[in-house]
Amino acid sequence: MTFRIRPLQPGDRTAWEPLWAAYLDFYATELAEGVTDEAWRRLADALEPVGALGAFAASDLGDGDGALLGFAHHTFHRATWSLTSYCYLEDLYTDPAARGRGVGRALVEATAELAVATGSDKLYWHTDTTNATARSLYDQLATHDGVIVYERTLP
């Protein structure tokens, strides 16, 4: 399978939405009304610290992108332990039909390259402890330092 990684553009929303919905289903998550629209607005806004990369299948005609195979959403933020910034890989999803073909790995590596290019000195992400498929890839790409994440929903 051949594919290319590039930043998602405003015209990619139609291709992105089914994968976004599948990602939310995977995590058994329902978002409040308007959150998906706002997420897309932020991802498409060059002035926001968030962004998205997409993996696109090679077009059958060789003159553009084919199907969107996966995405990686990232957020850049300042850190108290660094003079530069960190890059948080917030969401990573690959269409099940494209798994095992290097798409997820390529999206993580492209996010790392983007983070380096923008001056970040760390790329990090989270996943569920039960997500064995993703963890088998992540264990090849990064180290798990044993940190436990606590979350508190605020009113």
Image (tube, rainbow, N blue to C red):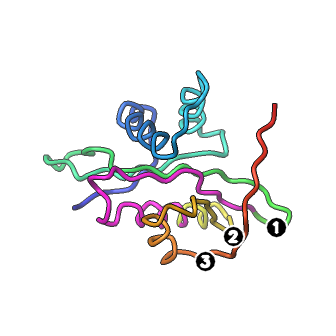
Image-quadrant location for residue 133: bottom left
Q: Residue at x 61, y 26 (%)?
A: 32
Q: In this picture, is 44 found above or below 118?
A: above
Q: Which mark is residue 121?
A: 2
Q: Is residue 64 left or right of residue 150?
A: left
Magenta stretch: give its range: 85-112
C-alpha span from label 2 to label 3 = 15 Å
Looking at the rendering, which quadrant does residue 127 occupy? Answer: bottom right
Does 20 appear above or below 83?
A: above
Residue furthest left as drawn = 61
- Can residue 155 be found in the magenta stretch? no
First of labels 1, 3 by sequence position: 1
Q: Mark 3 and mark 1 in contact (Cβ < 8 Å)? A: no
The answer to which of 71 and 28 lies nearer the viewer is 28
Looking at the rendered image, the disc whose residue lies closer to the viewer, 1 or 3, is 3
Asked which secondary structure carries label 1, the reply is loop
Which numbered dot is residue 144?
none
Residue 11 rendering spot, x and y as whole percentages: 39, 32
- Which residue carries the number 1 mark? 83
Contact check, label 2 and label 1, Cβ < 8 Å: yes
Q: Callout 3: 10 Å neighbours few (<14), some, many (20+)?
A: few
* Number of numbered tags placed on the structure image: 3
Mark 2 Cα within 10 Å, few/some/many (few <14, many 20+)?
some
Judged from the image, the secondary structure of the residue bearing numbered disc 2 is strand
Callout 2, which amino acid? Asp
Q: Quadrant of the C terminus?
A: top right
Give, as a three-letter code, the residue at label 3: Thr
Instruction: Name the residue located 65 percent from the left edge and 39 percent from the top edge.
Output: 47
Residue under numbered circle 3: 143
Q: Residue furthest front?
A: 130
Q: Earlier in the sequence, mark 2 or mark 3?
A: 2
Residue 25 x, y percent position in the rendering = 46, 40
